[in-house]
């Protein structure tokens, strides 16, 4: 950047879909540096931006608009700016959209207001009552207090404090705002680890002590205590004066994790996810930037918080598909967490009972350290797994639970234990049709069926959010009471359980039930406290929860995830079934996992029931390597959408014709997407496949540059390393 002077020009990156930074004049007397958060004019508006690295365009400063103000805010550090540039370059996203994720709390750019406080002075009141004495003695323990805090701590009324202020015993001072959360105490309550856990914790802590970049894959069977193990690495990073980021895939997992963290460190971590109130998000952002918040537990967007001294990142349940963002900037938070750690030179820990194949291969090749836990805490036995062949033991007509599983549920409930029925399908039924004319209820904006939600009385699309009341008569032929629900959702399984076991306490867990996250947390707590006999849930019950009385898990439609063209279908089905059956027997009670399937001979089912993940990973690794699929090859998807099918298909063909000649990279398509219409927009997809070292980003840049610019309603989105093929 040019030396300071009367007329300087600097690049400023604004949080808009801009491909580069814009040049602005620095007014005389204003001081800025790379990373400074500033306000600049953009058209008729004033927007926040970040002074960026590099030289500005060589333009006469007199012709440029000036920076309006510099926010009183810690600048984005050099490592954070490099990370933003890297993400933009890798994902082929405009840098402005990436920096937007780091500037999510504009109200936090100004300092939080100071608050009124009290400090003990030398003067003492003429009349010293017992209440006043308690207040003075309490105040002596700490230098500064708030009025209400001191009154509460001393067990006196606020008027007692006010009287001491008038007497000159307390002087008023201005104090910094309260921290969002108290500082964690690393010595508060270290868990009693067994020898294997202690060895694993020592290995992770050693990586923190060594400093520098490293990635450790912490793989442990369900219930093996992975969280308690990586907490010791968290403690070591905190003791070294560093901040820590812990990523979680689901908001539903947050509260149980917060409770465990607080039990270990005596204070909760700060939270960062969509359910956090905007004002609290702003305070977290500011205090992270100032270094006052030491630990954040959050969703994938927490990766873009402006940590002042980040020294460790942990990705819990690292295999989870929820870490992939598929909106605006397409990125995978697990992979970007590793990138952020590498760029700033600190360790990363990836934890899972069923690691992604990518992480497994990296561990096998030595790129990642591999730390394993192969037994449950307190020697609790893993559940005994079995397959229920639905061809031999079909449910009765109109039902979906096999008699074999029903018998096991009955026996479990009689023993005073809990049974969990898992089905990865929300609502009551995935399709509703008229038995008279065959009319099927389809979303008017998407090429999908409307899901019947009986508890809400609606038919709903899970892709665009369209919802309509469930009618009594068919809208096509007008026939009353002839609408048929086809297939099961969790609501229908709950109905079947209530009819079959009317005396059992049955509870339904699903993310879209009325009451939202707060109700869901209450119900999860109720299950953990033994206040339910039969639990029915979607995939949110498959991970991270500890249900002491759960001794039976039944997977209702285990084949569901295998029936699509996703190259990761087998891996995801294996992970989901392994995780959900792992909810059983975590406290040492004898437990069972029963998997209903029409294809018990499928390799995934055989690997699950054999309790042999190595067999599955070896087979899947060989299949992927033979096909040149990730992690042995690279994929990129191009999604073309438009208001009409013709426009989308035509631009897809133009992109295909513009593809450079490269024998190492194959372009497939364009083909209509499996979900051909979403939110009223028609979709075509192209897929680029190449070897692991293929310059895929350069290839796609040339391809899109050679193709005609999208016109009209056409939009092109590039997804590097796609996780969804719909």
Image (cartoon, rainbow, N blue to C red):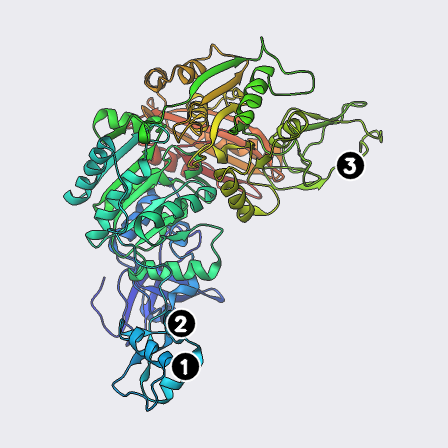
Residue 51 in view in this figure: no
Local SS, label 1? helix
Q: Which residue is label 2 attached to?
A: 155
- Which image quadrant for residue 349? top left
Q: Is residue 216 left or right of residue 568?
A: left
Q: Residue at x 71, y 31 (%)?
A: 441
Q: Is residue 666 above or below residue 404?
A: below
At label 1, counting other C-alpha atoms closer than 10 Å, the crowd grade (few under 14, some 14-19, many 20 or more) is: some
Distance (Cα) linking label 1 and label 3: 65 Å
- Which image quadrant for residue 681? top right
Q: Residue at x 37, y 18 (%)?
A: 611
Q: Is residue 634 left or right of residue 441?
A: left
Q: Which residue is label 3 attached to?
A: 471
Distance (Cα) linking label 1 and label 2: 10 Å
Q: Nearer the viewer, residue 530 or 621?
A: 530
Of badges 2 and 3, nearer the viewer stands 2
Query: Percent position (x, y) of residue 726?
Result: 52, 30
Q: Is residue 295 left or right of residue 458?
A: left
**Of label 1 and label 2, which has the lower sequence position?**
2
Q: Residue at x 37, y 48 (%)?
A: 297
**Of label 1 and label 3, which has the lower sequence position?**
1
Q: Which residue is label 1 attached to?
A: 160
Query: Percent position (x, y) of residue 59?
Result: 31, 64
- Which image quadrant for residue 359? top left
């Amino acid at each position: 950047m040019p030396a300071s002077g009367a007329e300087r020009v600097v690049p400023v990156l604004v949080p808009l879909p801009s491909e580069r930074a814009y040049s602005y004049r620095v007014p005389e007397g204003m001081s800025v540096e790379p990373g400074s958060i500033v306000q600049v004019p953009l058209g008729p508006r004033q927007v926040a931006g970040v002074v960026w690295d590099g030289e500005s365009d060589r333009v006469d400063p007199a012709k440029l608009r000036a920076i309006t103000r510099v926010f009183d805010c810690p600048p984005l550090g050099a490592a954070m700016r490099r990370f933003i540039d890297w993400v933009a370059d890798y994902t082929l996203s405009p840098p402005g959209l990436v920096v937007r994720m780091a500037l999510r709390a504009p109200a936090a750019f100004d300092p939080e207001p100071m608050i009124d406080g009290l400090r003990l002075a030398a003067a003492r009141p003429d009349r010293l009552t017992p209440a006043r004495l308690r207040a003075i003695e309490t105040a002596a323990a700490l230098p500064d207090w708030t009025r209400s805090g001191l009154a509460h701590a001393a067990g006196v009324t606020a008027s007692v404090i006010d009287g001491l202020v008038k007497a000159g015993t307390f002087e008023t001072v201005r104090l910094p705002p309260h921290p969002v959360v108290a500082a964690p105490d690393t010595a508060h309550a270290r868990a009693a680890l067994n020898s294997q856990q202690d060895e694993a914790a020592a290995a992770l802590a050693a990586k923190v002590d060594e400093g520098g970049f490293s990635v450790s894959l912490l793989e442990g069977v369900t219930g093996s205590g992975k969280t308690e193990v990586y907490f010791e690495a968290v403690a070591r990073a905190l003791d070294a004066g560093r901040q820590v980021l812990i990523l979680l895939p689901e908001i539903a997992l947050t509260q149980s994790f917060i409770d465990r963290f607080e039990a270990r460190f005596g204070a909760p971590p700060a939270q960062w996810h969509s359910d956090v109130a905007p004002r609290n998000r702003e305070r977290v952002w500011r205090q992270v930037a100032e270094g006052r918040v030491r630990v954040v537990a959050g969703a994938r967007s927490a990766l873009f918080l402006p940590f002042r001294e980040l020294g460790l990142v942990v990705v819990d349940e690292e295999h989870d598909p929820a870490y992939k963002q598929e909106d605006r900037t397409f990125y995978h938070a697990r992979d970007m967490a590793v990138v952020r750690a590498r760029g700033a030179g600190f360790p990363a820990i990836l934890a899972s009972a069923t690691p992604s194949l990518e992480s497994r291969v990296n561990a096998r090749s030595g790129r990642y350290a591999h730390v394993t836990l192969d037994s449950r805490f307190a020697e609790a036995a893993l559940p005994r797994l079995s397959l229920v062949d639905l061809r031999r033991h079909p449910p009765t007509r109109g039902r979906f639970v096999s008699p074999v599983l029903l018998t096991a549920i009955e026996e479990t409930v009689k023993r005073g234990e809990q049974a969990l029925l898992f089905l990865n399908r929300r609502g009551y039924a995935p399709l509703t049709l008229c038995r008279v004319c065959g009319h099927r209820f389809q979303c008017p904006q998407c090429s999908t069926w409307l899901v019947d939600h009986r508890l809400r009385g609606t038919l709903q699309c899970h892709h665009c959010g369209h919802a309509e009341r469930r009618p009594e008569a068919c809208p096509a032929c007008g026939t009353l009471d002839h609408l048929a629900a086809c297939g099961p959702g969790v609501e229908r399984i709950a109905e079947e359980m209530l009819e079959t076991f009317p005396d059992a306490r049955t509870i339904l867990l699903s993310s879209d039930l009325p009451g939202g996250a707060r109700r869901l947390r209450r119900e999860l707590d109720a299950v953990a406290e033994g206040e339910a006999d039969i639990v029915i849930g979607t995939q949110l019950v498959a991970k991270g929860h500890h249900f002491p009385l759960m001794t039976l898990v039944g997977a209702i439609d285990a084949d569901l995830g295998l029936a699509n063209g996703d190259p990761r279908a087998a891996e995801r089905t294996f992970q989901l079934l392994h995780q959900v059956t792992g909810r059983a027997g975590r406290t040492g009670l004898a437990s069972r996992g029963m998997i209903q399937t029409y294809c018990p001979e499928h390799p995934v089912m055989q690997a699950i029931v054999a309790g042999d993940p190595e067999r599955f990973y070896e087979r899947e690794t060989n299949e992927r390597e033979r096909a040149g699929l990730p992690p042995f090859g690279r994929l990129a998807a191009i999604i073309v959408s438009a208001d009409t099918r013709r426009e989308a298909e035509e631009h897809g063909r133009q992109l295909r014709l513009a593809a450079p000649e490269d024998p190492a990279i194959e372009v497939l398509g364009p083909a209509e997407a499996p979900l051909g219409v979403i939110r009223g927009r028609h979709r075509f997809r192209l897929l680029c496949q190449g070897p692991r070292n293929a310059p895929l980003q350069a290839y796609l840049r040339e391809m899109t540059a050679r193709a005609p610019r999208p016109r009209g309603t056409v939009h092109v989105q590039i997804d590097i390393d796609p996780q969804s093929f719909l």
